[in-house]
Amino acid sequence: MQRSPSEKWAERPSPAWTRTDLERDPWTARLRSAPPAAAAARRALDPLGPHVGPERMESLRLLATELVTNAVMHAGPGWIDLDSRLFPDAVIVHVADEGEGFDPLLLAGSRPGVPGGRGLELVALLADHVGIDCRRPFRVWFAVGR
Amino acid sequence: MTPAAAPPWDDDPVPLDIVVGGGEGTPEVRVAGELDLHGSDALVARVRALARPGGSLRLDLAGITFIDSTGANALLRIDRDARHAGAAEVRFVVVRGGPVARLLELARDLARRAGATTVVADLPGLDLAARAAPDRDGCVPLPDRRR
């Protein structure tokens, strides 16, 4: 599919989506698995801005960045899908990629001697809930209170 | 053999501004924008050549609006590289309560929970700027935590 330059890294909903839209339908931003996807993921969360507190929004941006970066680094080329959905008290974001997934214990805490940026530990620290779906496509989700 | 094609993101602008100033042996680098996977390698590469034996290196990070664990690790690499190159002093200026300071605090939380030091928490030479605007005179130096 031919994409315009602005659509090259992410397909995203219009920032004009209302809260009702966001509560009714989860939306997907489809990112190309490459370094610019990290920033594209943050932009893709923009529609949540008016409906989530600023500190929570900052956590959401960091959480999505860490998981998308992890996918870019380890899942190889392909697509990364970022699904977001607004609930009355929480936001839930799923990050799916085309890779093989990772050991859930990497989310559980420190593994001394394991190389890496500690991004997954940061996810476990920041999110109110976090989980992994090991079916294909591999999927990590996190929930943050609004 | 044909040369490998450039990665398709090579022409994609990194959301990061890097301005090098200061004198020979005492470079000052101002970094503004979003420091993540896309800009980290570029920043490390840009700063690597600047350190001089016995000199100092100062990174003004007050203009950073977003940083993640990849960016924090880039700062650590910069610190290590400069000390390897013989720099006598490496200092990072960050805004008190700003994105960089908050991420480093999270990293210290992780270190405390793990009962060990994380790489990020070992970052020495941190100045916390008292004001939101980058202002060298407003910097409050922390005690040097190096042994």
Image: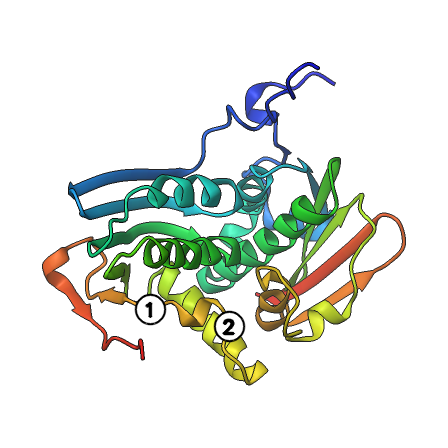
Q: Residue at x 61, y 49 (%)?
A: A69
Say left or right for B46 vs A12.
left
Q: Foreground residue, A23 or A73?
A: A73
Instruction: Where is residue B136? Give x, y as percent.
Output: 14, 57
User: Which residue is identified by label 2?
Assistant: B118
Whether residue A20 appears in this view of the structure is: no
Q: What is the three-letter code of the residue carrying label 1?
A: Pro
Q: Residue furthest left?
A: B137
User: Which residue is identified by label 1?
Assistant: B124
Please tell me in which quadrant of the rendered image residue A104 appears. Answer: bottom right
Instruction: Where is residue A125? Give x, y as percent.
Output: 59, 72
Q: Residue at x 71, y 49 (%)?
A: A74
Whether residue B29 appears in this view of the structure is: yes
Q: Residue at x 66, y 44 (%)?
A: A72
Crowding around mark 2 (Cα neighbors within 10 Å: few <14, some 14 to 19, many 20+) is: some
Who comes first in sequence, dot 2 or dot 1? Answer: 2
User: Is the C terminus of chain B in the top left, top right, bottom left or bottom right quadrant?
Assistant: bottom left
Q: Foreground residue, A38 or B49?
A: B49
Instruction: Where is residue B125? Give x, y as percent.
Output: 28, 66
Say left or right for B146 vs B40.
left
Q: What is the three-letter code of the residue carrying label 2?
A: Thr
